[in-house]
Structures are given as C-alpha cells and as structure tokens.
Image (cartoon, grey):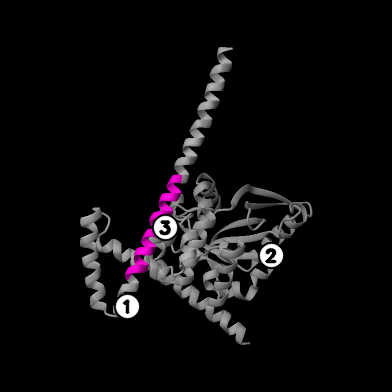
Amino acid sequence: MMFDWQEKDDLLIQDLQKLIDDAKSAAAITINSAITILYWNIGHRINQEILHNKRALYGKQIIIQLSKRLTQKYGKGWSEKQIRHCLRFEETFHDREIVYSLSRQLTWTHFRILMYIQNENSRAFYLEMCKIEKWTTRVLTEKVNSMLFERTAISKKPEEHIKQELKELSERSILSPDLVFRDPYILDFLGLESHFSEQKLEEAILKELERFILELGQGFTFVARQKRLLIDGENYKLDLLFYHRKLKRLVAIDLKLGRFKASYKGQMEWYLRYLEKYELEEGEEAPIGMLLCAEGNREQIELLQLEKSGIRVAEYITELPPKEVLKNKLHKVIEAERERLSHELDK
C-alpha cells in the first residue's frame, strides 16, 4: 500500500512539474513576443519622426539624444546601437501584422540576425527555415555563415521562381526538392585525412550520422547502409538510403571519390527504378537519387539532364575553406547556372 502511495505521489509531482514547465514556456513566449513588438514599435515611431523632418543630420542627433534619455530613465539596454537595431528592424520588416505573428515563433535574436541579411530572397529563405525546422539562433548563425541559401538548388533559379517557391513554402508549407538539396555539402566534421577511400568516407558519415543529417537538413531519416538490391540475379549495393518525411520520398545516396562520370547516371537509374518497384509505399513520391562526388563535371551534368531522371549531383567538401573563397565559388556557380537557364528560356 505504501508503494502505491509513493507511486501516486510521483505521478502527482510529474503532473505538477509539467504544469509549471508549460506555464514558464508560455510566459517566455509572451515576454519575447512583447519585447520584439516593442522594438518594432520603437523603430517605427523613430523612423516616422526622422522621415517627417527629412534630414539625415537630425536622424543622427535624435538617436544620440534618445539613447541618453532612455538610459537615464530605464538603465542599460538602450545604447545607440540598440536603437539602430530597432530602426533596422522596422525598415526590414515593414508589415506590423507579420511581425506580430512571427514574434510568437522567433526570438528577437533571430530577427537581429535576419534583418542584416541583405538579399531579400536569402532572408526569406532563412526566415521560413527557422519556422519550419525550429532553428536555434546558434544553428541559424551556422547556416548563414556556411552560406546555406547559396548552396541550395533554389538559389540558382530565376528570381521570380525563387519568390514563388518561397511564397508556397510560407503560405502552404510546400517544401520542394530545390529547397532541400544542396551543392556543395560541407563535411568538415568527419575528420578525414587527405587520402581516404569510399569505405572510409561511408564509415565516417555513419560515425557522425547525427551531424551528417544536420548538414543534409531536417526531415531526413536514416534507413540503411549498403542496401542490397537484387537485379537479374546479381547483387548491387547502394551506399546510403534515407527517407525525407516532408518530401515523402526515399533518397538514395551514392558516394564517389573523384569527379562525376556520365556512367554514374545509369547505375543510379537502376537503383531508383528498383526502389520505385519494390520499396515504394502508398502515398509516397518517386525516389530521388543523389550522387555525392568530390568534384562535379558541370557540362556533362548539364548534357545528361539528370533532374529529369530524378537524379541530383552535389560536391562535398571535407575541409571548410575561408568564407570569402566559398562565397566567390558559389556566386560564380549561381551566375553560370542562371545564365544557362536564361539561354534555355530564350530558345
């Protein structure tokens, strides 16, 4: 009988702890929302005053004076820098209603990172991914620093196409493969030496599977390694098999050490047709294949029109280069791809 009372006490304590924790979480969300909206309203009110006077010098002077007087009244937290953050916040996110809605999902620190991203499409991409994947500010910073947007397939599309896909993501939560797959993938966390085999690469990925999935993006679930496929009585092995919950697709990944070769296409097509025939569940979309190569071969990839076969090619980097080097490389790739798409549309 004593044991039953002890057990009931434990259950009661668990229930009370949950009530307290839930209340704390709700209070934290409410406080964060109130602070975020306050900063937006302050930025809006000051911007109105500066625009009304239409003088840049007046704007600079008012920020200095406001900082001094607010600090005297309320203490720390109202530096000139903080007031400039408020101004930038309102200038970047014009719509009050959208800010009110987002303030329940994102913290002020999220907004402070997002509002200094210059490119509108890039900023919208990170904003939507924060909402969908519930990124912490640390993860958001890492993704921005690793130039995730520039590494997605969507960044290489025409501007209107990007805006449309981001709109569908925002309004209908439709996540397309172009928003999921990246090129290159940064695998610097694997700790590989300068020379390694495909087996070593696979083993390193499995050892650091959690971090590999984080680099792939949320929604990926590991299914199998060295997946055995029996075709015409012969055994074939697929390096890695994942499932993406939002895309509702199996994702077959084949690891390659060198440059992409045209012969890889036929092999991956076998794998995808096999998975489609024997592994596809009701309600799922056709599988997607990804050839993860040490180096691409852009002209061959373009001529083979791999995306029509549900195949994507991406490079992987085992050592993260300086950000400026990565930035220049990605911008060259984006410009080249957009130029190619532009020529295709002109035909």
Q: Which residue was labeled with disc 1?
A: 52
Per the picture, the main secondary structure of the magenta-coloured stretch is helix
Which stretch appears magenta? 27-46
Which labelled disc corresponds to residue 255? none
- Which mark is first along the chain, 1 or 3? 1
Q: Is residue 157 above or below residue 132?
A: below
Residue 266's disc number: 2
Q: Which is more toward the observer, 183 or 106?
A: 106
For marks 1 and 2, give the one nearer the viewer: 1
Precedes in sequence: disc 2 or disc 3: 3
How far apart in space, not on screen, are marks 2 and 3 (Cα)?
A: 44 Å
Foreground residue among 182 and 47: 47
Can you give x and y, in whole percent of width and height, for residue 328 in the image?
Answer: 41, 72
* Residue 148 in sight: no
Work out which residue is located at the far right of the displayed protein and give it.
232
* Separation (CA) of disc 3 from disc 1: 30 Å
Q: Which residue is mark 3?
A: 110
Q: Position of residue 211 (x, y in %)?
A: 49, 49
Residue at 46% x, 50% y is: 190
Which callout, 2 or 3, points to the residue nearer the camera?
Answer: 3
In which quadrant is the C terminus drawn? bottom right
Label 1: state its secondary structure: helix
Q: Earlier in the sequence, mark 1 or mark 2?
A: 1
